[in-house]
Image: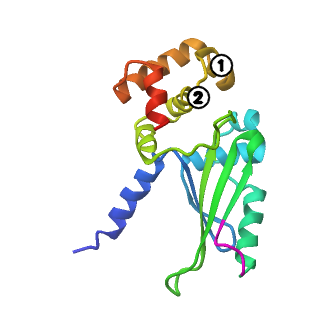
Amino acid sequence: MSSPAPALLDHVLTMLEDVPVGLLLLDADCQPLWFNEEAARACAVWNHGERHAAALRARSAFKVPPVLAEACAQLRDDPTAEPVKVVSENARGLHARIKLQHARTTDVGHAFHIQLDYRRPRGDRHRPLSPGAVALLARLSEREREVAMRVREGMRTAEIAAELRRSPLTIKTQLAAIFTKLGVRGRTRVAALLNR
């Protein structure tokens, strides 16, 4: 009888792809071991800027942003440093929480666990999402999450359309899908659920 570990790992990795937060795992030399689509998107914006990143296939063009590699190297090389470091570019809405995870066994080296967040800055940008809000966002597609997060921040349909470079009709269609998936009747309720 074979071990269930490989099958379990496949399920965990598939589940992590749908998490509405960028997740990136680097080895001790700052080389990528694994990342989800949200992480690929955030890293593309960090490396190329929002406009150029939108034209890229983020996963195939993946590269660790130099600012993150430098922060990881500092954590690795300074034994007196705290094991967690936050790197932010507030003007572009990019944030990373880097944690140096020390090896628990001798056959696996140290690794960096990185959570990436990319949202355009607004006045309430630094308010964290509750676990309940993250669970709700996980029900939505990536594009629907982008719209829902802007609804959370109080943006109107025209503002969302302009910021995301989509038509207002597309945004209205995505809002309708969000309402259905979250079981609500309007944007006020979406904002309330995501701000809890």
Which residue is found at the position 50% from the left and 82% from the top? 104
Which residue is found at the position 72% from the left and 56% from the top? 87
Q: Amino acid at mark 1?
A: Glu
Q: Which mark is residue 150?
A: 2
Q: Secondary structure at mark 1?
A: helix
**Left or right, 161 with reference to 106:** right
Quarter holding the N terminus is: bottom left
- Residue 13 on the magenta span: no
The outermost residue toward the top is 169
Residue 82, position as x, y percentages in the image: 67, 73
Residue 78, position as x, y percentages in the image: 75, 78
Q: Is residue 119 above or below residue 184?
A: below
Q: Amino acid at mark 2?
A: Arg
Q: Is residue 186 above or below residue 145?
A: above
Q: Secondary structure at mark 2?
A: helix
Q: Which mark is residue 179?
A: none
**Mark before the other along the chain sequence, 2 or 1:** 2
Residue 67, position as x, y percentages in the image: 77, 58
The outermost residue toward the bottom is 106
Segment tinted magenta in the rendering: 80-84
Residue 61 in view in this figure: no
- Magenta stretch: helix, strand or loop mostly: loop
Residue 104 in view in this figure: yes
How busy is the neighbourhood of tag 2: few (under 14 within 10 Å), some, or many (20 plus)? Answer: many
Residue indicated by mark 1: 159
How busy is the neighbourhood of tag 1: few (under 14 within 10 Å), some, or many (20 plus)? Answer: few
Q: Are marks 2 and 1 in contact (CB under 8 Å)?
A: yes
